């Protein structure tokens, strides 16, 4: 086994291995708090065991405990904590002493968290405390954390004498870690006292505030210790409320609201203390209630916070379901805690304080529905749907209500099924269902993703009108709720904007006003989101290239070059460069070639193949057809003829680049046509393949059919554009002298 103290003496190989474990540990701590993180910790622990380094094994066990506590999984959290104590029992001398001390001392906060969940027995918690005490006495460490934990368990049993006895023991130790003037210590100690002796707790708190030179009558929010003073003043005001001193509590509440603000109080305050204090300040109280409901597991733990929210909602709407549902849950939790501890202290506190002065309770029918009420997540959503969700404009996936977080994750995952829907009818039905669910959950991310992904699927099927309509809907959702939609999700739309414009420009049934509004909406959107502007200019270049407006194309490309330099960290320049090559290949072949050569240096394998194909095509146009064909044939053979291995390269470029006397084009044409989706954006593939088939396989019926399709698309483009540019250009380039072009479409 390697001791923490021996790290400096390790040889180079061992030191590198241990350093790597430290780096992994740091990265794991930063992962999202979910089941996946627990699994990563398990794998990490196995690696630490192989490396025989218990210091990081203990750290990982503590990490698992922390994640489980945050997830509200108290039974598993206690198991993880006991495993941590076992590591310390076996290998504590090999772990950094300060870590051992911190982990042993955590028994106090662990007990306060675990005792609040009736699923964990007090006997289990007591055994964990015994394990910690054994280690502390063996190591001569600070014992006060154990005394705090035992006081917590005694209070949960309703045993006032034992609670006060343990508190007196912890005070008599004069521990540096548990000073009586420490804000955190006060917040642990005095609520335990108040449960059995409110006047004593109030007087003690007033004394501690004087010791700290904090004046309850005059809050100075500019003081350096104001952050520590705030929770103590909330606690004092709560004691005043319980003692019937509402006017004194209101004076403190008004000072806190003026100096700290309702939002910060809601975020930083302890719900069961703060919400009653703000009772006569309903707007501020509601902000605290809604913050609390977002963070409650609604699983029977946190009974006092649940009771606080219940009281607030009953006062606001005595006949409403929200207060009744929360009250029923708080009563069930209190009864469970009383059964566990063999006491009535929790239920009595509900009756004597939390429900004091409230109208006769109403009992919503769902409470008696064992199937719905017995399902923790279903019950939680029912409670949130009774008030919190209707009051909430939008919910971010980064901060969903913790009680139904998994439902948000599952809902987001279900939106991805849109891309694989077999038919447009299936996609429409799924989109309608997902949109309805998004409204139920007020989920900003899926409100945006559903139209976006539905539209992208439509685009893949050649339905460009639906693509444009849905992309516009997604733009509206993102602009309305940009702060609630994660950057990584918003970036999906950013990446596909230029592609959407490309498809829209190529589609005759999408009008120019619709295209212009699509672009202008994105301009307005990116002014809000701060997304890259290069895509906007690329869209303008797309329009200019389609309309043969060389001057506007040149101007757009000049602007694009400046933007790409400025926004290099916000986008993939090579992806944009490939689009630039496509747009300039006919109008400015030298510029296109220079851009393609830059891609050879910076692109990945797929992008390099695409750039090389463009260069071969440009060489073939300038006269070196045989060499270009040989090079491009070699590359195609190296990827086993996979035309998709060239990324966004238009298929007609591959066909024309390879075409040369004696080259068999049939298999390539087959592969290219297998990839088309009947979208008008495939016009040039239809034309190139049709022309090649007419020349090399005149009996193949696909040749005339592709010619007719190309003619139909160009005629409809001309009708939309108000000129004959596209039909003339396609006829002269691919069907010169062919009197049949356009005749039968």
Image: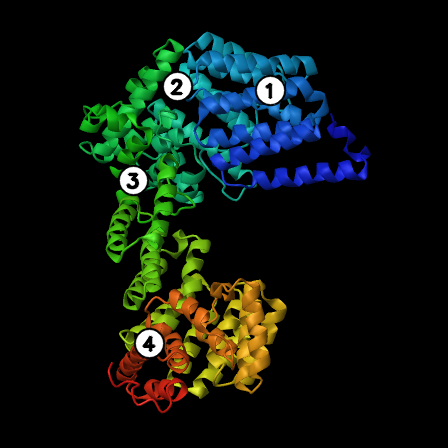
Residue at the spot of label 3: 388
The quarter of the picture where the N terminus appears is top right
Closest to the camera, between mark 1 and mark 3, is 1
**Which residue is at 36% across, 92% downward?**
737
Residue at the spot of label 4: 706
* Lower sequence index among marks 4 and 3: 3
State the CA–CA distance, disc 3 to disc 2: 25 Å
In the foreground, 448 or 640 = 640
State the CA–CA distance, disc 4 to disc 3: 58 Å
Judged from this view, the residue extending furthest toward the bottom is 737
**Which residue is at 39% across, 42% downward?**
409
> What secondary structure is found at the residue carrying circle 2?
loop
Closest to the camera, between mark 4 and mark 3, is 4
State the CA–CA distance, disc 1 to disc 2: 23 Å
The spot of residue 74 in percent (x, y) is 45, 24
* Lower sequence index among marks 3 and 2: 2
Residue at the spot of label 2: 118
- Are the residues at dot 1 and dot 4 in contact (C-beta closer than 8 Å)? no
In the foreground, 204 or 164 = 164
Pointer 1 local density, CA inside 10 Å: few below 14, some 14–19, many at least 20: many
> What secondary structure is found at the residue carrying circle 1?
helix
Which image quadrant is residue 603 in?
Answer: bottom right
The spot of residue 578 in percent (x, y) is 51, 72
The spot of residue 652 in percent (x, y) is 44, 75
């Amino acid at each position: 086994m390697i001791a923490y103290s021996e790290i400096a003496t390790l040889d180079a190989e061992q030191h590198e291995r241990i350093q790597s474990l430290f780096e992994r540990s740091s990265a794991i701590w930063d992962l999202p708090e979910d089941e996946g993180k627990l699994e990563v910790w398990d794998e990490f622990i196995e690696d630490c065991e192989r490396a025989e380094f218990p210091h990081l094994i203990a750290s990982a066990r503590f990490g698992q405990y922390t994640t489980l506590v945050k997830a509200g999984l108290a039974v598993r959290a206690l198991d993880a904590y006991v495993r941590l104590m076992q590591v310390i029992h076996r290998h504590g001398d090999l772990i950094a002493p300060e870590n051992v001390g911190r982990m042993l001392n955590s028994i106090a906060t662990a007990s306060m968290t675990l005792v609040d969940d009736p699923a964990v027995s007090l006997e289990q918690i007591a055994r964990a405390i015994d394990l910690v005490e054994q280690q502390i006495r063996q190591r001569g460490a600070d014992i006060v954390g154990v005394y705090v934990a035992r006081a917590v368990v005694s209070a949960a049993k309703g045993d006032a004498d034992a609670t006060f006895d343990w508190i007196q023991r912890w005070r008599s130790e004069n521990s540096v870690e548990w000073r009586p003037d420490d804000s955190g210590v006060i917040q642990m100690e005095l609520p335990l006292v108040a449960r059995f002796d409110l006047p004593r707790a109030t007087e003690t708190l007033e004394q501690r505030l004087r010791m700290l030179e904090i004046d309850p009558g005059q809050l100075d929010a500019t003081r350096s210790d104001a952050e520590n003073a705030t929770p103590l003043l909330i606690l004092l005001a709560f004691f005043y409320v319980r003692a019937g001193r509402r006017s004194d509590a209101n004076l403190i509440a008004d000072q806190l609201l003026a100096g700290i603000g309702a939002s910060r109080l809601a975020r930083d305050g302890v719900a069961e203390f703060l919400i009653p204090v703000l009772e006569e300040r309903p707007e501020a109280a509601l902000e605290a209630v809604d913050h609390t409901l977002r963070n409650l597991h609604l699983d029977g733990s946190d009974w006092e916070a649940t009771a606080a929210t219940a009281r607030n909602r009953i006062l606001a709407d005595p006949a409403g379901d929200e207060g009744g549902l929360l009250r029923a849950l708080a009563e069930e939790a209190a009864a469970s805690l009383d059964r566990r501890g063999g006491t009535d202290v929790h239920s009595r506190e509900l009756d004597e304080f939390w429900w004091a002065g409230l109208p006769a309770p109403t009992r919503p029918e769902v409470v008696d529905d064992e199937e719905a009420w017995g399902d923790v997540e279903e019950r939680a959503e029912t409670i949130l749907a009774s008030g919190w969700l209707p009051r909430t404009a939008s919910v971010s996936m980064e901060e969903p209500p913790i009680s139904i977080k998994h439902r948000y994750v599952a809902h987001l995952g279900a939106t991805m099924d849109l891309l694989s829907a077999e038919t447009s009818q299936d996609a429409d039905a799924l989109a309608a269902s997902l949109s309805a669910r998004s409204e139920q959950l007020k989920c900003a991310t899926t409100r945006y993703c559903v139209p976006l992904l539905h539209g992208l699927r439509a685009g893949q099927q050649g339905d460009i009108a639906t693509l444009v309509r849905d992309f516009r809907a997604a733009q509206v959702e993102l602009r309305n709720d940009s702060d609630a939609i994660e950057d990584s999700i918003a970036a999906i739309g950013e990446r596909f904007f230029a592609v959407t414009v490309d498809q829209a420009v190529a589609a005759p049934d999408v009008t120019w006003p619709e295209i212009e509004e699509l672009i202008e909406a994105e301009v307005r959107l990116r002014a809000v989101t701060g997304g890259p502007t290069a895509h906007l200019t690329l869209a303008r270049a797309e329009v200019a290239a389609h309309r043969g407006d060389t001057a506007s194309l040149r101007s757009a490309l000049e602007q694009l070059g400046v933007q790409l330099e400025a926004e290099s960290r916000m986008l993939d320049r090579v992806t944009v460069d490939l689009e630039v090559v496509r747009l300039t290949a006919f109008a400015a072949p030298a510029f296109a070639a220079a851009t393609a050569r830059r891609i050879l240096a910076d692109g990945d394998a797929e992008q390099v193949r695409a750039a090389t194909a463009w260069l071969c095509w440009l060489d073939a146009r300038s006269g070196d057809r045989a060499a270009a064909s040989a090079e491009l044939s070699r590359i195609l053979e190296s990827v086993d003829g996979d035309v998709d291995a060239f990324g966004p390269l238009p298929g007609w470029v591959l066909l024309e680049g390879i075409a040369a006397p004696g080259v068999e084009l049939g298999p390539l044409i087959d592969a290219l046509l297998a990839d088309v989706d009947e979208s008008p954006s495939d016009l040039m593939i239809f034309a190139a393949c049709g022309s090649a088939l007419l020349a090399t396989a005149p009996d193949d019926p696909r040749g005339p059919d592709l010619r007719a399709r190309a003619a139909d698309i160009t005629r409809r483009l001309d009708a939309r554009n108000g000129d004959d540019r596209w039909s003339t250009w396609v006829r002269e380039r691919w069907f010169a002298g062919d009197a049949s072009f356009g005749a039968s479409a």
